[in-house]
Amino acid sequence: MSDAKLQRVLSSLTEVYRQLNSLPSSQASYAGYVKLDTNENPFALPKAVMQSAVAALERQYLYPEDDNISLREAAAASYDLSADQVIAGNGSSELLSLIYKAFLGPGDSVAMLSPGFAYNRKLAQLQGARLLEIKWGESSLLPIHELLFGPAKQAKFILLANPNNPTGTFVPIADIESLVALSDQLVVLDEAYVDFAPDSALRLVNRYSNLLLLRTFSKSYAAAGIRVGFGFGHPEVIGRLRNIQNMFNMNVIGHAVGVSILAHRATYNENHRHIRHERERVRGALSRLGFSVTPSHANFLLARVPAGRDGVWWHACLKRKKILVAVLPDEGLEDCIRVSIGTKPQMDAFLAAVEDISGAQTISMMGRIAASGSALLHVGKDSGDRKESDDRKTGLPQR
């Protein structure tokens, strides 16, 4: 295609999509790295769940079930809801995208508590909408007044996550209920990490028609690569979202694994206990190494790095040791890294790398201090030598 034809094609994009850059054709491969940057759960599926995935491959020649009905019914039974209160998606990210498409047009606004899930910025941009980022209150208190009476008052919906990503902080469900009860807007509550937290807002779904709850099996059920997510809400809202989903949006393996996980949720209890235990162990170790770590109720930790360096520097140092962690684009988090909690060997490798980097940094700093002191001594000696020489020249008495 000639350049002139290409420019003609690109000019036919909508104004919103013309603002997006073309993605590169390939991304770097990090095989052999300890991957602690995207909050996956690294454990194998339980045997029964794995068997369901293998069995589903025998039906690969069939289209998946229309409208995900069996999966929705299984989720409804598991979470004590009706099937028309449930939408199933190719991960909760698909459902989040549907919400943006359904509720936002050019010039509209959506309110998100910040710092929050950065992907929401792109979703708003794709709709030509404004993302209003409302700062969390001190001690992670929910800023209810700002959400109800500030600029967010005109937003089409309010988005918050509990526990929050990237901080891992948890808001009492009573505070969330206060917001939902006082607001006439849709409140979208992302509970991606709720299985690592002390409580859930699931009981509020039947009480409030303006609450839409999102769940995923990516974090606590080790199925990030299979893509299974759910939305729970009022049948009228859920039904309209289902009506704009892609045909056959999930595959037969996703259906089978989703149903099997719902039937074997108790088998994940040890998995969740391990992650909570490792989370606290790593938090303590990082604190002893000079990091300031936010108490977390998710499967990751947000850690402010020791003074003198920023998150990008630590990310680069750890990457050279084949450890991947996340750095954050949010204002105020430049000095932070986010670390997923994985297996004990993975976390041991991470902590060993941090100790090595911390030790090397200390030695380097001591070397700079020693070099600086030596330079001062030389300056003092040179000054004394010059003074003695000047005294001889002028005939002044020498001391």
Image: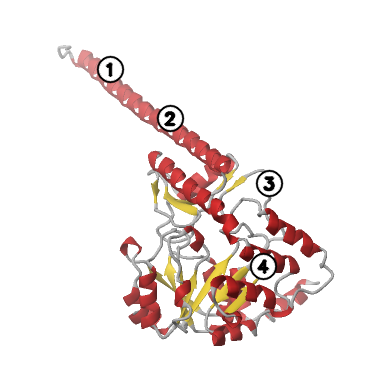
Q: Mark 4 and mark 1 in contact (Cβ < 8 Å)?
A: no
Residue at disc 2, secondary structure: helix
Nearer mark to the viewer, of 1 and 2: 2
Q: Is residue 358 above or below residue 92?
A: above
Q: CA distance from mark 2 to mark 3?
A: 31 Å
How dense is the environment of label 4, judged by Cα within 10 Å: few (below 14), some, or many (20 and up)? Answer: many
Q: Position of residue 98 (x, y in %)?
A: 60, 78
Residue at disc 3, secondary structure: loop
Q: Earlier in the sequence, mark 1 or mark 3?
A: 3
Q: CA distance from mark 1 to mark 4?
A: 85 Å
Task: Provide the residue designation for mark 2.
Answer: 363
Q: Is residue 105 visible?
A: no
Q: CA distance from mark 4 to mark 3?
A: 31 Å
Would residue 205 be found to the left or right of residue 87 on screen?
A: left
Task: Provide the residue designation for mark 1.
Answer: 385
- Which amino acid, by three-letter code, is at mark 4? Val
Residue 259's disc number: 4
Residue at disc 1, secondary structure: helix
